[in-house]
Image: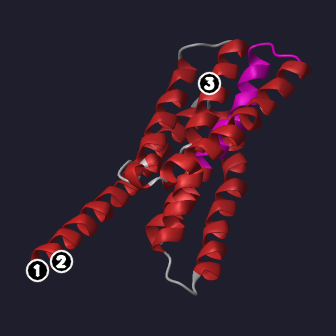
């Protein structure tokens, strides 16, 4: 469970580093207030339908082999890195959309995975711990992003990308757990025959 909590904290922390920095970069690129509003709204516009889509996909039995949090974390890191290469407000719109779509493939499947791994009767405690870890990342991310931004405008972006690549390593444990579960099932089947 500690892996889930650390991954939840780091994922939210990395996301907040990045999403706090996006409007600051947009202002540097000459964005007006309407463009800042659009940039902020793009996240929800894409996150809502895609979180439903990825929740549905990750809950399907034949797709359970796909480690959605691992793939999404790595893809999010890649999208964040692209921020270095194109420096205009229109590109930030695209990056905001792509990043929120990839995060929609991370959070709902992660919550489903936590639910599957939780013992009956302990879900309240687990949800409380998950929410605390997630909220700590939400709180600390913007604070640290502001400090890092003052040092170098792309420092929060760099840190965010690194964090997403690191959290993908946490999500590898899901794949290992699934493989171990499959071996255990196969062993039980062999013993039956």
Q: Nearer the viewer, residue 12 or 30?
A: 12
In the image, residue 88 sits, relative to residue 137, either above or below, namely above
Q: Nearer the viewer, mark 3 or mark 1?
A: 1
Residue 84 in sight in this render: yes
In the image, 127 versus 14, the foreground residue is: 127
Q: Position of residue 28 (x, y in %)?
A: 75, 18
Which secondary structure, mark 2? Answer: helix
User: Do callouts 2 and 1 mark residues in contact (Cβ within 8 Å)?
Assistant: yes
Sequence-wise first label, 2 or 3 = 3
Q: Is residue 153 visible?
A: no
Residue 191's disc is 1
Asked whether the residues under the numbered discs 2 and 3 touch, taking CB atoms below 8 Å apart as contact, a structural biologist would say no
Q: Quadrant of residue 126?
A: bottom right
Horizontal placement of 40 versus 65: left or right? Answer: right
Residue identifier under label 3: 95
Which residue is tagged 2? 188
């Amino acid at each position: 469970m500690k892996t889930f909590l650390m991954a939840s904290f780091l994922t939210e922390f990395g996301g907040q580093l990045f999403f706090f920095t996006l409007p600051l970069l947009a202002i540097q690129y000459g964005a007006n207030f309407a463009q800042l509003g659009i940039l902020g709204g793009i996240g929800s516009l894409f996150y809502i339908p895609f979180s439903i889509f990825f929740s549905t996909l990750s809950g399907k039995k034949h797709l359970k082999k796909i480690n959605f949090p691992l793939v999404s974390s790595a893809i999010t890191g890649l999208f964040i890195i692209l921020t270095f290469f194109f420096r205009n407000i229109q590109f930030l719109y695209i990056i905001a959309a792509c990043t929120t779509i990839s995060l929609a493939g991370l959070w709902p499947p992660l919550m489903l995975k936590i639910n599957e791994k939780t013992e009956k009767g302990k879900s309240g405690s687990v949800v409380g711990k998950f929410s605390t870890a997630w909220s700590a990342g939400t709180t600390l991310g913007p604070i640290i992003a502001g400090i890092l931004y003052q040092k170098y405008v792309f420092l929060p972006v760099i840190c965010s990308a690194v964090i997403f690549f690191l959290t993908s390593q946490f999500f590898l444990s899901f794949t290992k757990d699934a493989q171990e579960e499959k071996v255990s099932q196969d062993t039980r089947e062999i013993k039956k025959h």
